[in-house]
Image: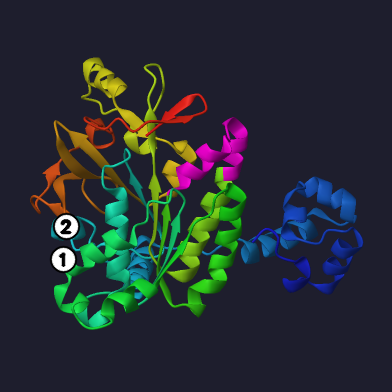
Amino acid sequence: MANKLLSEMGLPKSIANILAARNLITAKDVFSLTEFELMELLDVDLSVVTSAVAHISEITCPPYQTALSLLEQHNQNENMAGHLPTGLKGLDNALCGGIPFGVVTELVGPAGIGKTQFCLKLSLLASLPSSYGGLDGSVIYIDTESKFSSRRMIEIGFNSFPEVFHTDGMAQEMAGRILVLRPTSLSEFTDSLQKIKVSLFQHGVKLLIIDSMAALLSGEGVQGPQRQHSLGWHISFIKSVAEFSRIPVVVTNQVRSQSRDETSHYSFQEQSRGESPEDAAKLDSHLVAALGIHWAHAVCIRLIFESRSGQRFIKLAKSPLSPPLAFPFNITSSGILLLNDDGVEMPGPEIHSISCQGHNNVITFGSEMMH
């Protein structure tokens, strides 16, 4: 709004001509000067400057909104956007319907824990005919680690939706709706992203999956400020794709080892008042999400996949509407299966920690350890 042209604001011609003559073109140009600086530059009285600044401010500043109007706007967006049900009843209930449209949902966890299995099932659900509860659309699946398996996806489909997949030709039709891209570098991935916006409407895309973002950065050896700068552009672009297309965007993230003296609490992970130093020390043995704090703040939903004492869990670690719940699960021939739909409420720092008992897949990421 600060870049709005002064010529479009309906200012009196006398002051508008003076502003243009002094090369003040946008609202930002005016706001960057004090009233006394404007008086001197424009050679006019204080009352004229005050009136002009008030007029520009009124047009430039966004209107006030009440809490009620924001709630009504949110409900309208929810009705327009909707959710992609995961098929996991307890998780869908906690997420108020499933993976939300128009925002970025992150799956974070160690290798082999089930993130890709979850993505394969989501791909099927998005391409499933609407008469069977699907979105009846196409899927763009960006597979950066070559983990996408069409054979495993068809196996999940036959076991999850036998009435659909046993229909002659249906398996081939649904598989044909899933467009798989395999960029081998960060530059190829960037090119793929820029082409996606054009493809969204041409192909009726209803879901975008990136599996995984962290693998591309590890392959490039991008570190420090350069890594954050590169990641910042991609975060903004991925969020804009979600908001522009109003589709669910799901991105997987790897994990890395946490050093004992590292500060890993994000603003939504602040140490609770009742947490003792001993409780905080327990976090030292856990892993942390690989992409760092900028990425953590960019995602709307964070699902943590972890293993504790041989049992796998999906933890709803971040959501604007949902409680912090953990759901035990197994991986079956039909994909991920929750062992109960109620979940276990897990407030405090434990909901954000990542345990990795029994998983030893470690990838070297510069000076960090990626899993």
Q: Residue at x 52, y 50 (%)?
A: 235
Q: Is residue 97 visible?
A: no
Callout 1: helix, strand or loop?
Answer: helix
The image quadrant where one finds the N terminus is: bottom right
Q: Which amino acid, by three-letter code, is at mark 2? A: Ser
Residue at label 2? 333
Q: Amino acid at mark 1?
A: Asn
Residue 3: percent from left, percent from top: 70, 60
In this rendering, does residue 289 appear at all?
A: yes
The magenta segment is 212-230
Do the numbered discs 2 and 1 sit on residues whose CB atoms are within 8 Å?
A: yes
Near-viewer residue (7 or 204) = 204
Indicate the secondary structure of the residue bearing disc 2: loop
Residue occupied by mark 1: 159
How many numbered dots are placed on residues in this image? 2
Place of residue 17 in the rendered image (x, y in percent of width and height, measured from the top left): 88, 68
User: Quarter-wise, where is residue 312 in the image?
Assistant: top left
Query: In which quadrant of the rendered view does residue 270 lie?
Result: top left
**Precedes in sequence: disc 2 or disc 1:** 1
Report the side of 104 relative to 225 (left or right).
Answer: left
Separation of marks 2 and 1 at Cα, in angstroms = 7 Å
